[in-house]
Image (cartoon, rainbow, N blue to C red):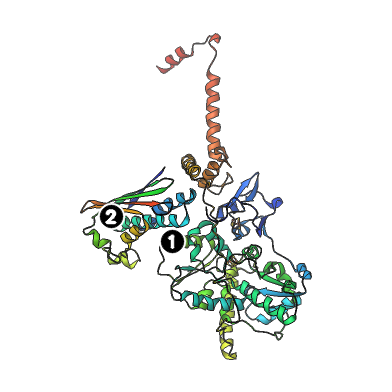
Amino acid sequence: MITLEMQLDGASFETAGEASSRVKKVLQQIGVPGDVTRRVAIAAYEAEMNVIIHARRGIMTALIYPDRTELTVADEGPGIADISLAMQEGYSTAPDSVREMGFGAGMGLPNMARCSDEFDIETVIGEGTKIRMTIYHEKRP
Amino acid sequence: MTGVSPYMPGYFHSVRLTAHHCKGCVNCIKRCPTEAIRIRGGKAQITEARCIDCGECIRRCPNHAKTAYTDCLDDLARYKYNVALPAPSLYAQFPPHTPVNCITSALNKLGFDEVFEVAQGAEIVTLAIRDYLKRSDIKRPVISSACPAVVRLVQVKFPELIEHLLPIDAPVEVAARIVRTERSRELGIDPDEIGLWFITPCPAKMTAVRQPLGSEKSNITGAIAISKIYGELLKALPSSAEQCSGRRASWVGVGWAVAGGETTAAQIDHSLIVHEIHSVAEVLEQVALGKLKHIDYIEALACASGCIGGPLTVESRFVAEQWMKKRLKDMRSEDTAKGIVARQGYDEVAELGVNERRAIEPRPIMRLDDDIFKAMYKVEVMDKTLGKLPGLDCGSCGSPSCKALAEDIAQGTASETDCIFRLREKVRDLAQEMVDIAQKLPPSLGKDNSKTGREDDK
Ligand code: SF4
Ligand code: SF4
């Protein structure tokens, strides 16, 4: 198993994509099929963006096994008031200034769920959110 | 595993090394977009499976040790009927007041029986792109496949984006197909007796002739570098435009020579234009992360400014761009005045590759081992090694960066002491050890070191 741990800082848009690229690179190095790598990368990227847009800081952990990748993103942030609403495509609480930049289109959570085989979210208002995703390297079970 | 093993040697490459010119400096290894080059035994070595023939190393080498293999005019003798297929970027090597007709008749003087403009193929591809983008079953953004170096970059570094590549043959292939079919019919000669020669701005296109992308066999016989025949062309330029027979391409096709020409011609609303191979890689990285969904088409070219900046052109790309833009402006008004319109349909071209085109196969180069367990072990070794390297990316070890050296060490093709800083540390440690050993005297020599030491401390 390979463990990658990456710090994420709220509002640091200039680093956006670095954490997900690192995960992606390792998957490419161990030869995980391209379409799977792409799903992991997109899921990781969306989670990373979520932290940057909404939270103060967070940690992304990727546990890479031969047969699967487990991504955990835990943040210190506002939490999500209504998860089922946030899971709807197009729903966003990102401020207008952020959305005008093309971020926070309200596709984050649904996109993560679509890319992962297992998806789990825990949130406490005022404290933070923890998202856990598993993506299998072979065909979906 | 899908696709061809990256460890398989034997690809044809246009870009080569002239070993006796190579001084082993590190200019080329640092700029290669796929980290294909290493310095070993004082000379550069290109890993074939990684090289995409972008020609970046040709530009960077101060000693001109990197060259591109292309065909030459002598090869024309082997064919009954020879056709030159000039890339639109050839016109940009001449000032705008030199008409295209002059350039094509100079080509005739060099021994070609006919000149067929690749720009005509570009006009057809322009129309085909417009039609393709109307489809709803395609992966967006569509990535242009006109530049073979970009296609190969996708194959090796972004295999997950292969489905985004435009599945239509490049303009030169389309042009070649038209000429071969039409001439063998009209002149009654065997198609194999026709020599079709692409006048190329780059090695990537030369490689694409020998190693076609997406079609079983290229219709092009060979490629001749613009820089190889430029001198002779200059001498052969007629003073006034001679009448040229046959169809002349409009500005729509000629404009493909410059970055942005393709999308302007195809009139695509949501398009993104990116040129220069490292910038192309950055944009592709974004596509791979699922961004840029709002873009329909990406015109991506390996050379800065597009094909006019090709490594086998002669004019500075800045001059060439200015000349080309002026030429296009003149052509537009001239075309309107003379009533020349760009091609409106392409019914006469039976097949553009959309349906019957062979899939472009992935050639991933990133994986460290075919066995996932071994690969994972190598990732760990890499990570650990990287922590011990200074992170200066100086290249003195012969690998392009500390990361690349760590990878080479994990692969067993390099060792830690290839790093001059690690070597120095080792030498220092060794020297220290020698000093320590030298200070240790056998007890029989009688001097009481420990006592003296204690007294000194006081
Ligand atoms: S042609 Fe391009 S990919 Fe090939 S070795 Fe040179 S710089 Fe690298
Ligand atoms: S941009 Fe044009 S000249 Fe440069 S490598 Fe691509 S096709 Fe060749």
Chain at numbered mark 2: A
- Residue type at mark 2 is Ala
Mark 2 falls on what kind of element? loop
Task: Give the residue furthest to the right.
Answer: B77
Q: Could you say which is closer to the camera, residue B177 or residue B458? A: B177
Kindly identify which residue carries mark 2: A55
Res A135 visible: yes
Q: Is residue B111 visible?
A: no
Look at label 1 and name its amino acid: Gln
Q: Quadrant of the C terminus of chain B?
A: top left
Which quadrant does ligand 1 occupy?
Answer: bottom right
Question: Could you say where residue B348 lies in the image, as x and y percent from the top left?
Answer: 60, 81
> Which class describes the residues within 10 Å of circle 2: few (<14), some (14-19), or many (20+)?
many
Residue at the image position 74 percent from the left and 66 percent from the top: B72
Q: Are marks 2 and 1 on the same chain?
A: no
Query: In this figure, which residue is indicated by the disc labeled 1?
Result: B286
Which of the pair A106/B4 is nearer the observer?
B4
User: Quadrant location of residue B14?
Assistant: bottom right
Q: Is residue B226 left or right of residue A67?
A: right
Q: Confirm or deny contact between disc 2 and disc 1 (CB under 8 A).
A: no
Q: Seen in the image, is A10 located left or right of residue A2?
A: left
